[in-house]
Structure formats: structure tokens, C-alpha cells
Amino acid sequence: MIDYVFLLITGVIAYHGLTYRDEDGESDTGHLLFGCIALVFFLRVLLVDILKLV
């Protein structure tokens, strides 16, 4: 159950970080960085802990 909650939280963080734009339409480096880190954790938990592919 905790894995699914972790997936939900990191998925929301990754989506927000990778799609965030400021008022000028530019991406912020900090948002992109933390979005990518959250995406890596999301994929790791999904593939290793839930789908047991590795």
C-alpha cells in the first residue's frame, strides 16, 4: 500500500516539475531537476517493487 502512495506522490511531483512554466513560458531549472529526480524514483518503485521486473 505504501508503494502505491509513494507512486502517487512522486508521480504528481514529477508531472508538476516537468510541465511547470513561469509567466514568460520558460521552464525553471530547479523544477526540471526535481521533476527528473522524482521521475527516476517513480520508475524505480514501479519497475522494481511493484512489477518486479528487475
Image (spheres, rainbow, N blue to C red):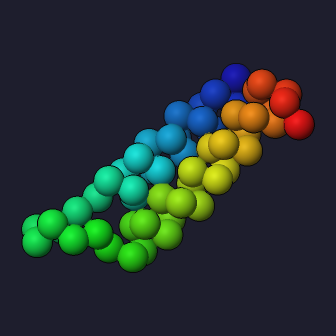
Q: Position of residue 46 (x, y in %)?
A: 70, 34
Which residue is situated farthest in the right direction here? 54
Q: Nearer the viewer, residue 22 or 2?
A: 22
Judge from the rendering whether residue 39 lies leftward or rightward of residue 29; answer left or right: right
Residue lying at 75% horizontally and 34% vertically, measured from the top left: 47
Report the quarter where the N terminus lies: top right
Q: How many marks?
A: 0
| Residue displayed at 60% across by 36% down | 7
Does 16 sit above or below residue 11?
below
The residue at the point 73 percent across, 44 percent down is: 44
Q: Looking at the image, which residue sits at the far bottom?
A: 29
Residue 25, picture quadrant = bottom left
Q: Is residue 29 above or below residue 37?
A: below
Instruction: Locate residue 27, reporting x and y percent.
Output: 29, 69
Rendered view: 27 above or below 3: below
Q: Residue at x 89, y 37 (%)?
A: 54
Q: Quadrant of residue 43?
A: top right
Using residue 30 as the reference point, say whether residue 46 is left or right of it. right
Residue 14, position as x, y percentages in the image? 47, 50
Left/right placement of residue 35 relative to residue 18 reads right
Specify whether 41 is left or right of 38: right
